[in-house]
Image (cartoon, grey):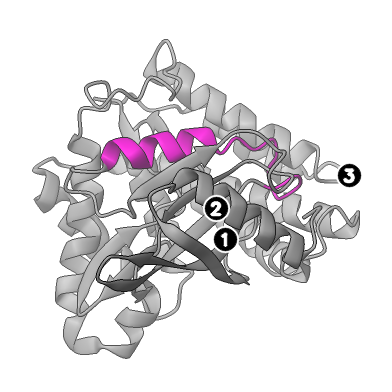
């Protein structure tokens, strides 16, 4: 970030004082940057102020748009607008506070939301086996419920809708193909073969829904045996809901100790009352491999060119890409 931590804290305190003029003697006492996530920076801040019956405190999250990351360009506005409009629905999300689209406060666009107490779902799942059935139920019922929402009725016009379901898929394939092409120094024949197969085998979609875009067990929080928040909406889109399911299946398969792919698919069908077409799911699982490989390659390229100093970027690129591409090739019999 352009600002030192002290300067950033001062600017944020002044900004939040303007957002909360009714809070007397408001002080931002802590600014804690976390190492979660690979693109958007997440910071926790603690606020204290005076009210008639004594001092009050609150913990908030600052979600900061990056200059560089795995897959630029970045736009923080859609995820904020989606989260804001999901308030009051059955989807558990942190309550949004405000969005800052200017860069004069801390050098980046950002939004503020409440901090939710909880543990990453994956860790809660591993640490509390007695809660797994309920956590599994929550995990799937939230996903299925999201796909049943009337996204137009929620006023989510900020999400671009393609002319057709097929065009939506073609755009997604093109996006990850471009990310891969700009992230590698030499062509990878297996990538070309898989991309060609994807372009020639786009399945029909029976509906277009709100999709999280990155739904998996490390993007949800749990507390007391229940899922309490869905986080990281940066890839939110309108698309084929089975894209979310295919992504969740892939991430489940590579996340040691989490719920099985079979369990996820069976429970999703029960939760939404729809049979998942096997060929359609197969397609989205193949595309999920390419999508994650693209993100890993972009992360590796960014770390090699020092666009991002986070060495985790290099690690996920080196460790992840070969297995993902090999997995896609094996699925297709290449």
Q: Are marks 1 and 3 in contact (CB under 8 Å)?
A: no
Is 75 placed left or right of 214 in the picture?
right
Q: Position of residue 185 (x, y in %)?
A: 90, 45
Q: Position of residue 215 (x, y in %)?
A: 39, 53
Q: What label sits on residue 63 in the rendered view?
A: 2
The secondary element bearing badge 2 is classed as: strand
Query: Up-down: is 23 above or below 280?
Result: below
Is 89 placed left or right of 45 in the picture?
left
Magenta residues? Answer: 66-86
Residue 118: image quadrant is bottom left
Q: Residue at x 34, y 43 (%)?
A: 281
Q: Residue at x 65, y 33 (%)?
A: 102
Q: What label sits on residue 19 in the rendered view?
A: none
- Any magenta on residue 73? yes
Q: Which residue is mark 1?
A: 42
Query: Up-down: is 140 above or below 90?
Result: below
Q: Residues within 10 Å of mark 2 (few under 14, many from 20)?
A: many
The secondary element bearing badge 3 is classed as: loop
Q: What label sits on residue 186 in the rendered view?
A: 3
The secondary element bearing badge 1 is classed as: strand
Q: Earlier in the sequence, mark 1 or mark 3?
A: 1
Q: Residues within 10 Å of mark 3 (few under 14, many from 20)?
A: few
């Amino acid at each position: 970030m352009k600002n030192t931590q002290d300067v950033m804290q001062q600017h944020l305190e002044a900004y939040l004082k303007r957002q909360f003029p009714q809070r007397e003697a408001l002080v931002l006492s802590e600014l804690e940057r976390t190492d979660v996530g690979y693109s958007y920076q997440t910071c926790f801040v603690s606020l204290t102020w005076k009210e008639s019956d004594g001092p009050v405190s609150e913990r908030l999250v600052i979600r900061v748009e990056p200059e560089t990351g795995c897959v630029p360009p970045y736009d923080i506005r859609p995820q904020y607008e989606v989260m804001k409009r999901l308030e009051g629905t059955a989807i558990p999300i942190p309550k949004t506070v405000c969005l800052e689209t200017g860069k004069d406060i801390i050098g980046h666009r950002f939004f503020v939301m409440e901090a939710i107490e909880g543990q990453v779902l994956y860790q809660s799942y591993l640490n509390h086996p007695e809660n797994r059935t309920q956590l599994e139920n929550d995990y799937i019922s939230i996903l299925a419920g999201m796909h049943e929402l009337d996204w137009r009725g929620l006023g989510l016009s900020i999400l671009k809708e393609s002319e057709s379901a097929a065009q939506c898929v073609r755009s997604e394939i093109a996006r990850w193909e471009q990310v891969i092409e700009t992230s590698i120094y030499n062509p990878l024949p297996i990538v070309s073969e898989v991309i060609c197969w994807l372009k020639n085998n786009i399945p029909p979609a029976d509906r277009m829904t709100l999709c999280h875009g990155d739904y998996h067990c490390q993007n949800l929080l749990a507390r007391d045996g229940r899922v309490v928040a869905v986080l990281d909406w940066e890839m939110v889109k309108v698309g084929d809901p089975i894209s979310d399911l295919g992504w969740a299946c892939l991430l489940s398969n590579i996340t040691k100790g989490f719920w099985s792919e079979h369990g996820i698919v069976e429970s999703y069908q029960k939760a939404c009352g729809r049979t998942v077409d096997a060929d359609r799911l197969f397609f989205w699982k193949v595309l999920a491999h390419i999508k994650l490989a693209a993100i890993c390659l972009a992360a590796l390229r960014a770390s090699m060119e020092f666009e991002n100093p986070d060495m985790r970027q290099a690690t996920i690129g080196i460790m992840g890409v070969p297995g993902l591409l090999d997995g896609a090739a094996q699925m297709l019999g290449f």
